[in-house]
Amino acid sequence: MALTNRLHRDCTRNTSIDLSPMIDCVFILLIFFIVTTVFVEEVGIPTNGPDTVNPPIEGSLLPVEIEITANGVVKYNERSIGMNGVPALVKQLVSNDPGVPILIRAHDKASHKVFAELYGRVKQAGAQKISFI
């Protein structure tokens, strides 16, 4: 009977868990990870993109703008020329002056595939100065 009373008395005693050592350990780990973190600068590919507000004007030549809309339509002077019309247009423009700047203005939601194909066709048509926004 005495053993039963003693067990009952031990069960009713208030117990608590001290979390201070665990919090100290977490702060030490936090400080360790902050101190040992290495910040890496990723190396990127430099591009020759112009200033988005004011495109550069080289000499007296204004850049020729070719636009890609959000749904992938290629336009020149607000007129749809399609991907197949680009080489003829660029060849005509660079025939008088091979240094005429070509500016490709792509919409934010335009496909990268369409942009890459347009850039390739402009380059193959003989344009030497190609910029993009």
Image (spheres, rainbow, N blue to C red):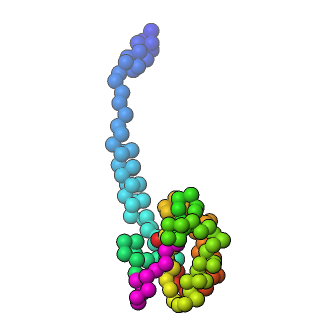
Q: Position of residue 95 (x, y in %)?
A: 58, 89
For the record, the magenta segment spans 57-66
Residue 54 falls in which quadrant of the image? bottom left
Residue at 41% of width from left, 12% of height from top? Answer: 5
In the rendered image, the quadrant that contains the N terminus is top left
Residue reaching furthest top? 1
Q: Position of residue 130 (x, y in %)?
A: 52, 80
The reply to whether residue 51 is in sight is yes
In front here: 117 or 74? 74
Q: Residue 111's quadrant in the figure?
A: bottom right
Overall secondary structure of the magenta section: loop
> How many numbered circles are shown?
0
- Which image quarter: residue 57? bottom left
Tell me residue 53's x, y (percent): 37, 71
Q: Is residue 59 magenta?
A: yes
Q: Name above or below for residue 94 compared with residue 12.
A: below
Instruction: Tell me if residue 68 is in the magenta stretch.
Output: no
Residue 106 spot, x, y in % from top left: 51, 67
Query: Which residue is found at the position 56% from the left and 86% from the top?
Result: 94
Work out whether residue 42 can be spotted. no
Left or right, 38 with reference to 80 = left
Q: Is residue 28 left or right of residue 127?
A: left
